[in-house]
Image (cartoon, rainbow, N blue to C red):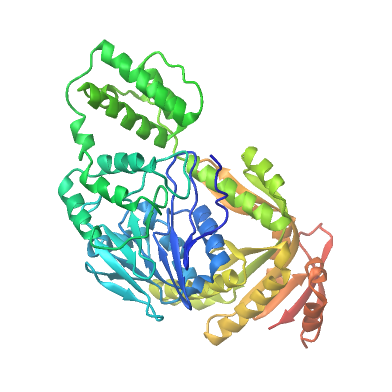
Amino acid sequence: MEKLDDRKSVNIIEDIWWVGFADYEAGFSNNPYLIVEKEEAVLFDPGPGHPFFRDLIVQKIQEVTSLEMIKYIVVHHQDPDLCGLIPYIEHLLHPEVVIICHPRTALFIPYYGTRKRIFSVGDEDILQLKSGREIQFIHAPYLHFAGNMMSYDIKTKSLFSGDIFGGFNRDWTLFADKSHIEIATQFIEHYIADKKPAEYLYNKLKKIPLSLILPQHGSIINKDINDFIEILMNFDAGQLINELESPPDDKQKNELLTAGKEWLTFWLKDDIKAGSLNELFAFAKEQGAATVALLFDRITRRAKELGVRNPLKTKQIHKWNNIQAPRSSRLLETTRQKLLTSQFSMLYGGETQVDVLIQRRLQAIKTKLIIMFIDIRGFTHWSENKPPDEIVRMLNIEMELITRTIYRHNGRVNKMIGDGVLAYFPESIKPYSLLAAINIHNKVKKANLLPVGIGMAFGEVILGDIGEELRLDFTLIGSTVNIASRLCDSAAKNGVVISAPCFATLPEEYQHKLQSYSSFEKIKIKIKENDPEVDGIRFLC
């Protein structure tokens, strides 16, 4: 199987884009989708919550359109693998972005920490875009959540089906073939306890012309669509309930062991040696939570054929000194590698080098970046006599404006530091970083917010995870970061201080533009008392 290079967005049909990522480790790929219709865009089921996923998804969206084009986020149910990313990206999208969901899902979305408006839609309600394009929402309760729904793009006859018709597949491909019918069937059997909701959906979908089914997990269905729809009438519901009867004898346990070993050999592409079900279970735990869950399912299916229950799921005794819990960080590790190798590729090019980095399980890179520190001036004095809610409201407004401007100029925000921001820009887009600094000042003035000071430096930094396992911080370290911080300290209100090396790398037209400023001056500062002086350029916007 040729694996998809999922560092890029993929145009599925007309204005529908796949902006997801493949999880070949767990076989549980995430498929956020994007509809871009003239000056509007709709994002479906953004994905799980973590800054790594944010940067990965944002990068793919920006390949297609600007973030502020996204006026709608549609979520089909409340699970974290669909909704967790919303609070990480909502402030980067259109200022009036709306989250659209089922009324029952609307009860849960705020618990993710979202701040944007949430709009509940009824069954067969229609969202009409400015162009006239219509997206219809189809309630599909209990599949597999009471507040579940789907979306139907009338223009392309595409169904965004959420979890239904998806599945676990380590040999994931972007588009499904007939073998995916069994995968999708297995998924439904373990997540749906009763056939009535499936029959209800089946009757609705049979009345709708379909050219594509786009599930949140698994593969996109662009052929044999009727065969997939028939799954809803031909599956065994409630498998997790049905497996709790009749313990196996020793002969049956050996048959279950053989089935489990055969499946793990297929799943992991490696010969599995285990003398008992418990040894097999322990080995699966070392591979991660997804492997454990899928091994359980496989043994359960064989146990059902034998008319017995899965012995791994009942009457086990667990003690502290022999608990072997699987780690759940494999997906984060994979995503981290993709993000870092993507940054490396963006900065230096060279797909061969990127492949080598992936094989080495890259955790950090040394690279050259433009580092930008932004500090709100006078914030401490301003906030002394203000109530907490007013302080937080103002700070959020200003931080959102700053962050939005940085992303609009293809930069990345690394972190918020109190009333400051640490951001960075790839070496290849130096002029964008200067334009971002100037525009931040202009927008802060226009919005009548507290002024800021900005420091910028260019040079080598280390980009990667810093900290310990339970509190890793994706961050930047190096002398360039320290220089940018000190330059920021030297910047006046509404001013920028840029290091001389950073200034020298700007195109001549930008250098001439800065030199025309009446406040343009060369300065020298010390980072620390015994350090040599650093040359900088200071100017007001």
> Which residue is located at x 62 percent, y 50 percent?
340
As drawn, 461 above or below 442: above
Numbered circles on residues, count: 0
> Which residue is located at x 59 percent, y 46 percent?
337
> Which residue is located at x 60 percent, y 53 percent?
475
Q: In this rendering, would 501 be left or right of 400?
A: right
Residue in front for this viewpoint, 387 or 305: 305
Which quadrant of the figure has residue 537? bottom right
- Kindly give the residue lying farthest to the left in the view shown: 196
Counting from the top left corner in percent of width and height, residue 335 is at 53, 47
Counting from the top left corner in percent of width and height, residue 274 is at 42, 16
Residue 520 seen: no
Residue in front for this viewpoint, 83 or 179: 179
Q: In this rendering, would 364 be left or right of 328?
A: right
As drawn, 296 above or below 465: above
Residue in front for this viewpoint, 3 or 370: 3
- Kindly give the residue lying farthest to the top in the view shown: 250
Counting from the top left corner in percent of width and height, residue 25 is at 49, 38
Q: Quadrant of the C terminus?
A: bottom right
Q: In this rendering, would 105 be left or right of 408?
A: left
Residue 434 seen: yes
As drawn, 229 above or below 170: below
Counting from the top left corner in percent of width and height, residue 169 is at 42, 40
